[in-house]
Amino acid sequence: MILAYCIIQANEKYSFRRVFENMELSSLDQANRLIPDGVYTTFRTYEKFYVLDLEGHFDRLEQSARLIQREVKLNRVEIRRVLRKLLENFPAEEARVRISIPLALDDSRKIEIYIFLENLIVPSLQDYQTGVRVITMRMQRENPNAKTTSFIHAADEIRQKLPKGINEVVMVGENGRMLEGLSSNFFAVKGGVVYTDDGHVLAGITRKHVLEIVRELKIPCTLEGVLYTDVPILEEAFITSTSRGVLPVCQIDDHIIGQGNAGKFTRIIMEWYQEKIKRMAEPI
């Protein structure tokens, strides 16, 4: 179930309405196809009315717009107010929320802010214990610093053709290094060192918190993607995203990673991330 709303922010006045009511929407990506291209962010709720680092999501929306030469200044108080109201009437216990802002309007004084809500579906307990399978593809974002909806459409087409049992596609850059997933960031452990690309990927909100945990745990870390040719000798791998949290990877293409389950670094990072959510998730 997807519910869609639009906030109109213009001349210090605000209004919102439900949109696309008569359409049977099956995914957030499908909903995004109904509006012009722009910037977006996606997050999940905790106990329905709590979010981890909502200000960070607002920051990313504004920064992504600037990176494509558009200026967007959000009224965060108003958006929070609307979000609370929408979640009060949302029938599911938890929601996956996407905020999308089309940037086709010439009038910078008027901003359309679309809010899409769907039932939150998270990986199974077994997935967190034994890990998931991913495959790789040679590709990368044109503008990795900006979270634009144009990438959603390309990723959605790839995702619809995924073989059964595959959780994610991890992109491999021209330099042969593992970059990021279609909707996640990618981490690998080799020789007791955590590797994750920094200069060619979208810096996810969950990734930011995971890197803070890695530093707190004093785990050696290299901000560079591991080479694809090193996949057979990786000790661990995991992906991160708002909905997944920290999710172990047990297989990349035809290669089993480590012992084929969540490794020791992955397990402790998962535990610390869950504790961080308990401490830092804030009321909307």
Image: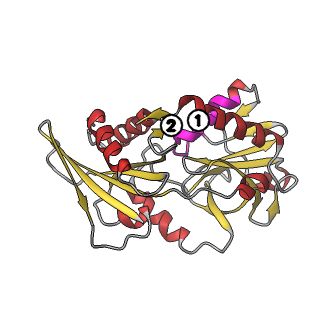
Tell me what residue is drawn at x 30 percent, y 66 percent. 34
- Which label is found at residue 277? 1
Whole-percent x and y of residue 147? 43, 48
Other-residue count near label 1 (Cα within 10 Å), few / some / many at <14 / 14–19 / ≥20:
some
Residue 115 forms part of the magenta stretch? no
**Residue at position x 75%, y 56% in the image:** 131
The label number, if any, that marks residue 94 in the structure image: none
Residue 185 vs residue 14, the one in the foreground: 14
Vertical relation: 172 (above or below) 272: below
For the question of whether residue 40 can be seen, the reply is: yes
Say which amino acid is labelled 1.
Ile
Residue found at x 46% / y 43% = 145
Of residue 277 and residue 138, the one placed in the foreground of this image is 277
* x, y percent for residue 13: 13, 39
Q: Nearer the viewer, residue 177 or 16?
A: 16
Q: Work out how far the residue at label 2 is from the one at label 1, CA to CA, in angstroms.
A: 7 Å
Looking at marks 2 and 1 on the same chain, the residue that comes earlier in the sequence is marked by 2
Question: Considering only vertical position in the picture, is 205 above or below 250?
Answer: above
Residue 184 shown left or right of residue 98 in the figure: right
Give the crowd class for mark 2: few <14, some 14-19, many >=20 residues within 10 Å: many
x%, y% of residue 18? 25, 59
Q: Amino acid at mark 2?
A: Leu
For numbered disc 1, what is the local secondary structure? helix
Q: Is residue 73 visible?
A: no
Q: Which residue bears the numbered disc 2?
A: 52
On the picture, is 206 further left or further right than 53?
right
Q: Which residues are magenta?
A: 198-214
In the rendered structure, the answer to whether residue 192 lies left or right of residue 90 reads right
Q: Is residue 214 above or below residue 1?
A: above
* Element on which disc 2 rests: loop
Are circles 2 and 1 on residues that touch, CB within 8 Å?
Answer: yes
